[in-house]
Amino acid sequence: MTEKFIFEDERRDMAMVAKKFFDRSRTNVAGGNISEKIVPEKSFDYGDIHIEKNHPYIIITPTMMSEAWFGNLEAAQILVVDLETGKKLDGSGRLTREINMHEEAYKVNPKISVVYHSHAPKSMFWGTSGLDEPNITEITKVQLKLGKIKCLPYRETCTKSLADLVSQELKDRKDQVDNILLLNSHGVLITSNDLHRAAMILETTEWNAEIAYKQAVFQKLGLLNGYKSCGKTVKK
């Protein structure tokens, strides 16, 4: 079956994830964006658009994904962008101003193929407080091996300064592909090598954020001495 437009299957999948992303309150009408890197194994043409073999492209949700569309996107609205030039090749809508964060993540680690930014509320509790999120649940700590869920210093939204800060943090983590960073007073940024795995990282980290918050309250009440994880007391 011939595809109706460039990277049709991947764009349909991203549109579905974006809708679930919004419906499950993993972001709000203030924003959020998702991108995925695609490196074709062969060259091909769609009309006057040429797709080059072994050349990096990204598909990315358009700006106003949440404000204008409430996450309910058609696959053809997902943008196709040449990762090296930044030129939009296909899709309906404008590029988000936060594309610089996505581009920097892909530059740092070629193994990263998904960047997933959201305003997930439970994780934002920690990020807006300027606190690292205690990593205490088995899936985030042991299975996903996310390590420290770090809150980065505040940088203004959409700025080069924020993109540079994210870039440096990912560089410091060397070859770590699965990451979640708290963006102070802004949201979370996830990297991975699979779109659905990135969604799972967000889902499980949101559970972790709520449980860690409740443990923090219990500590303040004197009912717990330190965070508890996997049968042990975890010092923050």
Image (cartoon, rainbow, N blue to C red):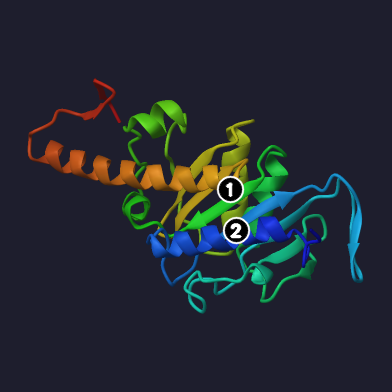
Residue 160 visible from this viewpoint = no
Which mark is drawn over residue 195?
A: 1
Farthest residue, direction top: 232
Q: CA distance from mark 2 to mark 1?
A: 8 Å
| Amino acid beneath label 2 | Met
Q: x%, y% of residue 88?
A: 77, 68
Name the residue at 24% across, 45% down.
213
Total marks placed: 2
Q: x%, y% of residue 224?
A: 13, 31
Name the residue at 91% across, 62% down.
45
Q: x%, y% of residue 97?
A: 62, 68
Which circle's residue, 2 or 1, is located before the other in the chain?
Answer: 2
Q: Is residue 232 above or below residue 75?
A: above
State the residue position of label 2.
14
Q: Is residue 32 above or below residue 218?
A: below
At numbered mark 1, what does the secondary structure look like: helix, strand or loop? Answer: helix
Name the residue at 33% across, 36% down.
134
Q: x%, y% of residue 223?
A: 8, 33
